[in-house]
Image (cartoon, rainbow, N blue to C red):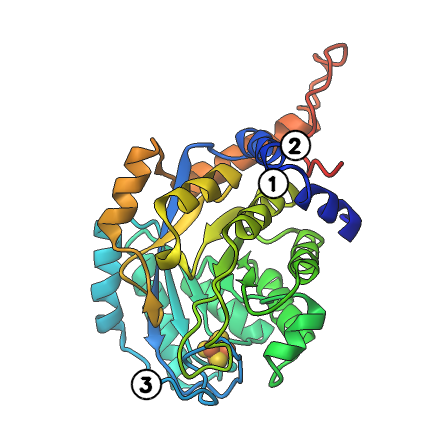
């Protein structure tokens, strides 16, 4: 069980030591030069009944966003094929809903999930709250991963969203796990929360059992018409510190740079990779906000000598690393010095 004090101690290390520590964990538990490439497609846009203060898709926020009904399978497949051709290994589909209803639209989504899965892409959905039967139906259709973020600390969460509780979020995450899907769960920095709130968010994630398979870390994109439109962009070094702390506290999670990358320089991207980030979303748009153009991402990855990370390769490395940290159990190595365990290095 990780404690807040332990996370604070890590976060406040000299940046040089923090990066070293994150790199030690990263080299032991991940492909150190691998970056997983994902694509996120909005399949139903806007008019969401939730009141998330950061979100241009909330019906409570007047951002001038053009709403779009649920896209049919054929339309989504155009983007899924393009994502695959561009080298993405995970295709994520997002619908701006408070919760999933078991209706014809859900049937439509199940068909779309199966069709995308048939392209041999990893499939992720983010559709709002869902019950365990809906989670099982998604899993049965071929959905590998479900994204549901906790957004921030429990305390700060209620300042940002009032239409559903932090515990509602945790309940959906439990339903996802119970259905056998992987969990993608993270949050947003730069909404006016304190560093303590950020660390408490990481604490909540790190103490999930098992820890989330992927942890998206977003930098708020302050969209005009949202209550957070005047928020300054998150401090670069504070962002990097959170990435490194996440890497150390959650060694086997894929840490994904998500929203806000358009406002980050190449150098900040490089620092994030050094701190242990190992996934990005490709494509010019991330749901409804801007994202770096794909050729820029490709160019930077090439300049840094980084390569595409296939999710199966990542899983193999995680399994091998866990095996090494636990010992193989054959009894032949009992007199050899034990490898340092690939557990969060918290002190
Ligand atoms: S639930 Fe999702 S789509 Fe709806 S307002 Fe919140 S962040 Fe936006």
- Circle nearer the N terminus (1, 2): 1
Name the residue carrying label 1: 251
Direction from residue 261 to residue 298 in the image, left or right: left
Direction from residue 139 to residue 289 in the image, left or right: left
- Circle nearer the N terminus (3, 2): 3
| Secondary structure state at the residue bearing disc 3 | loop
Direction from residue 321 to residue 105 in the image, left or right: left
Q: CA distance from mark 3 to mark 2?
A: 46 Å
Picture coordinates of residue 274 (x, y %)?
Answer: 48, 37
The answer to whether residue 153 is above or below residue 47 is above
In the figure, residue 166 lies in which quadrant? bottom right
Picture coordinates of residue 76 (x, y %)?
Answer: 26, 69
Q: Are marks 1 and 2 in contact (CB under 8 Å)?
A: yes
- Circle nearer the N terminus (1, 3): 3
Q: What numbered label is drawn on residue 342?
A: 2
Q: Residues within 10 Å of mark 1 (few under 14, many from 20)?
A: many
Say which of marks 3 and 2 sits in front. Answer: 3
In the figure, residue 290 lies in which quadrant? bottom left
Name the residue carrying label 3: 67
Q: CA distance from mark 1 to mark 2?
A: 7 Å
Foreground pick, 4 / 233: 233
**Residue occupying the point 64% across, 51% down:** 211
Foreground pick, 223 / 325: 223
């Amino acid at each position: 069980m990780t404690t807040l004090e332990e996370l604070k101690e890590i976060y406040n290390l000299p940046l040089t030591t923090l990066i070293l520590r994150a790199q030690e964990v990263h080299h032991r538990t991940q492909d150190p030069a691998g970056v997983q490439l994902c694509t996120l497609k909005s399949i139903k846009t806007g008019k969401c009944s939730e009141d998330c203060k950061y979100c241009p898709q909330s019906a409570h926020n007047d951002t001038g966003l053009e709403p779009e009904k649920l896209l049919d399978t054929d339309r989504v497949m155009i983007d899924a094929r393009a994502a695959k051709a561009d080298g993405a290994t995970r295709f994520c589909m997002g619908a701006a809903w408070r919760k999933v209803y078991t209706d014809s639209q859900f049937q439509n989504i199940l068909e779309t999930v199966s069709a995308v899965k048939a392209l041999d892409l990893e499939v992720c959905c983010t559709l709002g709250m869902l019950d365990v039967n809906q989670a099982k139906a998604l899993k049965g259709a071929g959905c590998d991963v479900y994204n549901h973020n906790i957004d921030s600390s429990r305390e700060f969460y209620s300042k940002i969203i009032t239409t559903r509780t932090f515990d509602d979020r945790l309940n959906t995450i439990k339903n996802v796990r119970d259905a056998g899907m992987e969990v993608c769960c993270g949050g947003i920095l730069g909404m006016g929360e304190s560093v303590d709130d950020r660390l408490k968010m990481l604490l909540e994630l790190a103490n999930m059992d098992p820890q989330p398979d992927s942890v998206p870390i977003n930098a708020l994109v302050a969209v005009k018409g949202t209550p957070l439109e005047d928020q300054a962009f998150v401090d670069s070094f504070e962002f990097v510190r959170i990435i490194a702390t996440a890497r150390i506290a959650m060694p086997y999670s894929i840490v994904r740079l998500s929203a806000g990358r358009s406002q980050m320089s190449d150098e900040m991207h490089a620092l994030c990779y050094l701190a242990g980030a190992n996934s990005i979303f490709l494509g010019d748009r991330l749901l409804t906000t801007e994202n770096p153009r794909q050729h820029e991402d490709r160019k930077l990855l090439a300049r840094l000598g980084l390569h595409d990370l296939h999710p199966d390769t990542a899983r193999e490395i995680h399994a091998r690393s866990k095996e090494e940290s636990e010992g193989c159990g054959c009894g032949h190595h009992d007199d050899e010095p034990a490898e340092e365990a690939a557990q969060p290095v918290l002190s």
